[in-house]
Image (tube, rainbow, N blue to C red):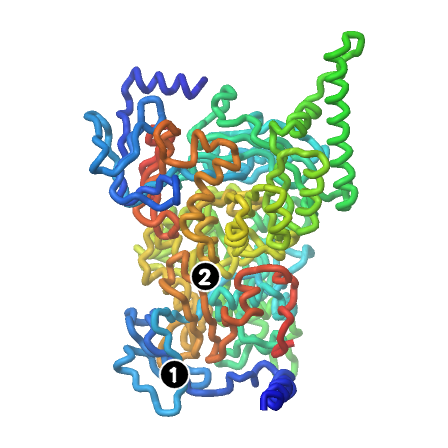
């Protein structure tokens, strides 16, 4: 609603002209991911892409503001972070909303209630070319809460329409990150998780029975059960953070038993289980390539994305969660590092654009530059993956949201 | 005939056995004369050489220059590095590799504690640093104290004990500095630790005044009545006399100025570390002629005092001629992407020349080791790194790391590769198994 209002405001005041983006090299991230040379993207008044084509074929209508850049890509998608919840100051009770440890399982905690779109780190990502994030509750307890997908120019969640998906996933953790007083062991953790999912199944049966039989009383509305029912029905994916191979195997078993939509998060040792993951058809949101190699990540490898690519397993990159510094990572920096370790360059770009959109179920709206899709673009003065390249402009929904070289 | 060959092949491992059992230093890389030719060489002390030769005898650089000008002596082994790049071995001025720790929670000022007694040279993090091209490192204790102890400067030779890696200074002593900190990290809720910045500065100043008194006592002591040794004050006296450098963690502009005042009052040698708000007081830093060791993180914050951290710190200091180095603060930034850190500085306006210097010679200067390392010059130790391409490209890989003429990292070696890339077993806090030379 807010976005729509904003749009009308812009139109009526004609604060901003419509945009045409000219690129020496344009990565539309369609087809074989090869770039077009000397191309143009026209952004419509409705915030969608009007046209994409070679500069010789697309005419820029009069009155359009023209932006030029050496390289243009779709706005980058951070497939899993905690930005907006884990704020810049790292100050508990003030800007750290990513994890509540009062209960090991709290799927009912909504991301929309915890997100602060005005935290400077959201702007930080936006200025660097990240236009969409899946953000929300962090790994660190068995079920920590919900995730949502939002664009990085949204300052406040005034209605569900401010997000691309208000409940894009439920975040779970298997492995030492989820262990404490209870669960204190991996065996207990799985028993608790299975028990809770069984409870949700029974709850669903009771709801169904009550609907059939007027004499039967419907169970009391439970936020927790409602959320888990959406997981069991496949409406909401369960994003399981699992780094060790035994935890990844446990996640696959859990999916086998309950049949939910599983997304593996982190998956540091997934290179040991490539066949199993491929067979299960489960996508992976890999840990940041530059994550720290300690604890459950001690056997992580910079080559993980390359290995997943070779195995044909769908994957995307993430900024993840950092308890200290850098308080947020930058998704295309993580992708770039993976290229040095064997991932083809265009696959790295795809993993932060169209392939990430597919994992989030949003490929009809974002992730590539095609007519009718959201006009989210990132402009660069060189190879977008090179550290020394600057982001020189960012467009979200056809609006210029950043123009400084960064 | 065939059978005979097979038999010979079977004997090969037996023939190699004595070599396997010999210690690291006697590996195949015996003292020798080697010419690395046709490489793009960044000597740092001079301009880039597009097709250059680096001539190494034993542990020392014999010559460096264009391949057409450097004469390769007969009998020298020649290694063609066409298409590759050679840079000086990287110097990390601030790292926590080796799993060591300094002072405990008994006091905020513990100059007597040596990291020398605590670093584990077989830790996987040291192997990872070699894989990142780091040849010289200042390993520090933490910033949770006003003064957490003595640091240790190491050359990342392949060795069995810490003494194989330490550096001897011209006066015969082991090279190290002293770690100090101010701001948030060294402030604690209770105990002997300070609760405010004012108290932090007062505690430090008082301790240095104690050290001054101790120094006078030492000066006046009669030969037959020696002053009782005080390990803590001895270290502070070394600082007062400029024998040891203070490596001072500091973030906020006012904390930076506090360090500059301490330096002014007690006249010690100091390097500012992190310096998140350097851009706010760059003029003052330049006027004080104090060197800075910076780090570039992928986002600001993590605590209030680092909120205004800015990538432009490098460029702002460069504009004012401040001697600027970089550090990994490993595990804050992993040693394996130290080069990438400099590229972030370039992104925000540092010149490529100064960024490369910040990874090498500038750090060597801050550790007083620039006579022997930090650049590729005749007479310096042969500490260098072979890269697959441009030092600031994200796609470039470290292929080899050499310390004092010996190869300590080789990407082509599967054991080394495990540390370079990670994988199953890479995290174990030991050297990888599989071979035999240094256990």
Task: Indicate left or right for A294 with B251 as reference.
Answer: right
Locate residue B354: give its quadrant.
bottom left
**x, y percent for residue B168:** 52, 79
- Chain bearing tag 1 is B
Q: Quadrant of the C terminus of chain A?
A: top left
Whole-angstrom CA distance, mark 2 to mark 1, is: 40 Å
Instruction: Tell me the residue at 64%/26% (across/down).
Output: A230
- Chain bearing tag 2 is B
- Against A334, residue A142 (above or below) is above
Instruction: Tell me the residue at 68%/49% (across/down).
Output: B191
- Against B373, residue A31 (above or below) is above
State the residue position of label 1. Answer: B78
**x, y percent for residue B433:** 64, 71
Residue closest to the eye, B424 or A102: B424
State the residue position of label 2. Answer: B271
Q: Judge the density around disc 2: few (<14), some (14-19), many (≥20) Cα neighbours within 10 Å.
A: many
- Against A256, residue B201 (above or below) is below
Instruction: Tell me the residue at 59%/76% (across/down).
Output: B159
Residue closest to the eye, A201 or B173: A201
């Amino acid at each position: 609603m807010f976005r729509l209002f904003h749009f009308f405001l812009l139109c009526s005041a004609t604060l901003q002209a419509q945009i045409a983006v000219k690129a020496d090299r344009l990565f539309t991230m369609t087809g074989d991911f090869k770039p077009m040379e000397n191309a143009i993207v026209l952004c419509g008044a409705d915030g969608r892409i009007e046209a994409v084509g070679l500069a010789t074929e697309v005419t820029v209508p009069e009155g359009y503001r023209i932006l030029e850049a050496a390289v243009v890509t779709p706005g980058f998608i951070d497939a899993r972070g905690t930005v907006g919840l884990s704020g810049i100051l790292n100050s508990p009770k003030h800007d750290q909303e990513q994890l509540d440890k009062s209960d090991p399982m709290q799927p009912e905690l909504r991301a929309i209630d915890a997100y602060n779109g005005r935290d400077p780190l959201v702007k930080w990502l936006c200025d660097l070319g990240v236009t969409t994030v899946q953000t929300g509750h962090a790994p660190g307890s068995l079920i920590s809460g919900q995730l949502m997908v939002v664009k990085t120019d949204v300052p406040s969640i005034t209605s569900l329409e401010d997000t691309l998906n208000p409940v894009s996933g439920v975040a779970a953790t298997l492995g030492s990150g989820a262990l404490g007083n209870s669960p204190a062991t991996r065996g207990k953790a799985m028993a608790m998780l299975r028990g809770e999912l069984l409870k949700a199944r029974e709850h669903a049966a009771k709801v169904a029975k009550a609907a059939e039989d007027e004499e039967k009383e419907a169970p009391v509305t439970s936020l927790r059960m409602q959320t888990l029912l959406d997981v069991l029905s496949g409406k909401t994916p369960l994003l399981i953070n699992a780094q060790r191979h035994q935890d990844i195997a446990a996640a696959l078993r859990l999916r086998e038993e309950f049949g939910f939509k599983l997304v593996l998060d982190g998956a540091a040792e997934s290179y040991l289980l490539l066949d199993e993951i491929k067979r299960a058809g489960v996508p992976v949101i890999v840990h940041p390539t530059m994550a720290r190699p300690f604890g459950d990540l001690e056997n992580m490898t910079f080559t993980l994305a390359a290995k997943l690519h070779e195995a044909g397993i769908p994957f995307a990159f993430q900024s993840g969660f950092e308890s200290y510094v850098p308080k947020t990572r930058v998704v295309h920096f993580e992708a770039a590092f993976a290229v040095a370790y064997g991932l083809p360059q265009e696959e790295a770009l795809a993993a932060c654009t169209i392939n990430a959109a597919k994992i989030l179920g949003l490929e009809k709206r974002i992730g590539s530059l095609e007519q009718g899709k959201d006009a989210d673009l990132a402009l660069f003065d060189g190879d977008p993956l090179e550290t020394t390249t600057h982001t020189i402009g960012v467009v979200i929904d056809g609006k210029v949201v950043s123009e400084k070289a960064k | 005939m065939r059978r005979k060959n097979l038999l010979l092949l079977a004997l090969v491992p037996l023939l190699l056995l004595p070599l396997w059992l010999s210690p690291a230093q006697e590996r195949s890389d015996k003292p020798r004369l080697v010419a690395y030719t046709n490489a793009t060489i960044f000597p740092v002390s001079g301009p880039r050489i597009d097709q250059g030769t680096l001539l190494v005898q034993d542990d020392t650089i014999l010559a460096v220059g264009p391949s057409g000008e450097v004469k390769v002596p007969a009998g020298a082994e020649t290694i063609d590095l066409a298409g590759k790049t050679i840079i000086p071995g990287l110097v990390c001025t601030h790292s926590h590799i080796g799993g060591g720790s300094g002072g405990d929670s008994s006091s905020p000022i513990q100059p007597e504690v040596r990291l020398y007694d605590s670093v584990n040279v077989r830790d996987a993090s040291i192997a990872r640093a070699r894989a990142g091209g780091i040849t010289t490192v200042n390993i520090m204790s933490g910033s949770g104290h006003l003064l957490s102890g003595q640091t240790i400067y190491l050359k990342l030779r392949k060795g069995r004990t810490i003494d194989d890696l330490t550096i001897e200074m011209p006066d015969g002593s082991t090279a190290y500095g002293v770690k100090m900190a101010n701001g948030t990290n060294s402030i604690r809720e209770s105990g002997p630790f300070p609760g405010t910045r004012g108290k932090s500065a007062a505690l430090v100043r008082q301790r240095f005044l104690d050290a001054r008194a101790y120094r006078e006592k030492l000066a006046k002591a009669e030969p037959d009545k020696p002053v009782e040794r005080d390990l803590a004050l001895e270290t502070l006296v070394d600082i007062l006399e400029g024998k040891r450098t203070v490596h001072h963690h500091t973030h906020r502009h006012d904390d930076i100025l506090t360090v500059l005042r301490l330096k002014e009052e007690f006249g010690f040698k100091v390097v500012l570390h992190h310096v998140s708000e350097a851009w706010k007081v760059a003029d003052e830093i330049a006027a004080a002629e104090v060197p800075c060791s910076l780090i570039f993180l992928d986002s600001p914050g993590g605590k209030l005092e680092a909120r205004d951290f800015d990538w432009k710190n490098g460029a702002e200091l460069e504009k004012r001629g401040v001697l600027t180095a970089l550090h990994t603060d490993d595990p804050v930034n992993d040693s394996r992407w130290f080069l990438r850190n400099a590229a972030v500085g370039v992104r925000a306006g540092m010149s490529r020349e100064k960024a490369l210097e910040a990874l090498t010679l500038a750090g060597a200067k801050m550790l007083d080791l620039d006579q022997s390392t930090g650049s590729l010059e005749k007479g310096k130790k042969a500490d260098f790194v072979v890269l697959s391409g441009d030092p600031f490209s994200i796609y470039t890989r470290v292929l080899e790391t050499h310390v004092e003429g010996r190869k300590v990292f080789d990407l082509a070696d599967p054991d080394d590769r495990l540390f370079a890339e990670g994988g199953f077993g890479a995290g174990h806090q030991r050297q990888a198994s599989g071979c035999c030379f240094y256990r």
